[in-house]
Amino acid sequence: MKIKDKVLVVEDEQSISNFISAILGANGYDTLVAETGAEALSMISSHCPDLIILDLGLPDMDGLGVLREVRSWSNLPVIVVSARTHEHDKVAALDAGADDYIEKPFGTSELLARIRTAIRHTRTPLENGSIAQSGKFSVGALTIDYDKHHVLMNGTDVHLTLNEFKIVALLGKYAGKVLTYDSIIREIWGPKAKADNQILRVNMANIRRKIEQNPAAPEYIFTEIGVGYRMRDEAE
Amino acid sequence: MPRGKQIPRAVRDAALTAAVLAAAVGLCALLDRLSEGENHVGLLFVLAVACVSRWTEGYFWGVFSSFFGVVCVNYVFTYPYWEFNFTMTGYPLTFVTLLAVALMVSAMTTQIKRQERLRLESAREAMRADLLRAMSHDIRTPLTSIVGNTAAVLENRDTLSPEQQRALLTDVNEDAQWLIRMVENILSITRIRGGEERLATEYEAAEEIVGEAARKFSKRFPHVRVAVEVPDEVLLVPMDATLIGQVLMNLLENAATHGGASEIRLSVERSGSDAAFLVSDNGRGIPRERLATLFDGGGGAGGGSDGKKNMGIGLSVSRTIVKAHGGAMTAENRPQGGAVFRFTLPMKEEPERDED
């Protein structure tokens, strides 16, 4: 018998946690529900869930507080639920170590896809350290050769500049995950770089002109408006 | 783009007061050397006090300047020099004059500012009231349908066939989706409640915003073909990306739901110092009688025929957003059929006013 993945839903609105539980149950997950941050923290340590779906607006404590507390001792995947218009919440949650976020209101298939991706990512851990990763990353016609510092489309070098390569390499390393603008800038231009989004936008526009057929209908690097960029995952 | 640092009011006012008073003192000293009389001293300080009272906030700096003026007039620039002489004949008059000028001008300034604020607030209030009226009318229909459909399913589980139940629930789902989009539009309005100076704009690549809107739209309307075109040049446009994304979404959805379009072309191009966004479709086009009042909010006279065509709100919200960015929005029918919506956004940010 296959062991079911256990998902903890931290959500104070019962009508929402009810339907999430129903969907997850119907799709082969075990579901636990916590209504407060304190309850969530105690359930995390006692039930060891495989994934947490965390609403940022909780009655007793800030959802980010729960996230930071969890991140202080565990890497278990956390998907944050946030309202569409609150980009700052999403950015803060990603920077605090959330694996992904989903916008309210969300559809069933979207929720399930996010859960699958997040769980798969923790099962295939990434190496830590700098961008200097070895080996190759491929998705679709795109290949990132980390040893030779090349990005190939259909086997042909697309001639990225050094910074362009670094950006693509970074996104490829975390494929499927949203990297916030600030975290990319920090990684490429150093921690002291002034957060200048314009340079990043221009670099990204140039990258897209080299690897995408139509830079406004990207197939490899997606924009998450107001938040950051995300490289397509193999499974997409 | 983060706004330039606002200099605290008090510091600004203090600096301004110091500058005006210094200028007055300087002028007095200059005129003192050139002419014999002392009449100009009092007059210059009256002028200085009036200026300070007009340009600073509240009463403090005006009153402060009048005291300073009295000291200067009495102590420095009139006989006996560098000595206080409170028995001088004109002294009480000078003092009373300066103080009166300070108080009157300050009072007037404060009043003008208050009236200005009230006027702005009432204009904003009127806009909000209009929107609310239009919205509550439009919201009632889908809510009624949701309540009715769910009640029908709950109360007739055994008599309704699974297909019938499914149809009713599909309606509920669609109505709820529609309500969500409506709420998103309302939320967008609250983001620009303060007018232009409150917009949190950042330089964004127009192609990213357009591309992302097309991607989201295609997820919701997979049967509508969207062609996206952007220039080779990277257009960096200062904007609140979420709001402009909302505008594009509204236009795309309108084309699909109201225009019945099967193909939409979404493009960006440079137009002088503006970036122009175009959404053109091959649908039915805009009814001639609605063209004039398209952006005014509400459904228009016959607009509510099928109960939930809130083209008005999406469009009026969109135009409000574009206007708040300093741009303009127009709509027309294409000669070959279908509608085209065009809006522009300035690519240079308005210069800040606080460089004084």
Image: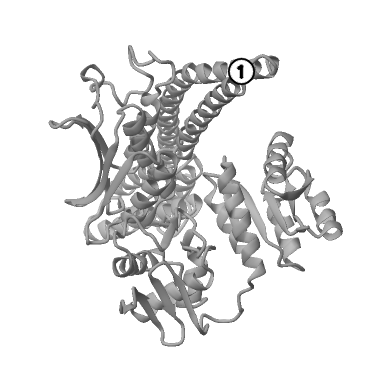
Q: Is residue A98 visible?
A: no
Most extreme residue toward the bottom is A148
Foreground pick, B74 / B239: B239
Decide which of B70, B296 is in the foreground and name it.
B296
Neighbourhood count class around disc 1 (C-alpha, 10 Å): few under 14, some 14–19, many 20 upward = few
Query: In the figure, is residue A184 to the left or right of B35?
Result: right
Residue A44, position as x, y percentages in the image: 80, 57
Residue at the spot of label 1: B147
Q: Is residue A5 left or right of residue A224?
A: right
Query: Residue A5: image x %, image y %?
Result: 74, 56
Residue A25, placed above or below residue A98:
above
Q: Quadrant of the N terminus of chain A?
A: bottom right
Q: Please give the name of the residue rendered at 33% of the width and 12% of the height, measured from the top-left corner.
A: B302
Choose top left, top right, bottom left or bottom right for residue A71: bottom right
**In the drawing, does residue A231 fall left or right of residue A21?**
left
Frontmost residue, A62 versus A170: A170
Write the residue at 42% across / 55% down: B3
Left or right of B291 on screen, residue A109: right
Q: Does B254 appear above or below B354?
A: above
* Residue A86, placed above or below residue B301: below
Q: Amino acid at mark 1?
A: Val
Q: Is residue B309 visible?
A: yes
- Judging from the image, mark 1 belongs to the subunit labelled B
Label 1 SS: helix
Which residue is at 37% across, 18% downward? B299
Q: Position of residue B287 (x, y in %)?
A: 24, 20
Horizontal and vertical percent for residue B288?
A: 20, 19
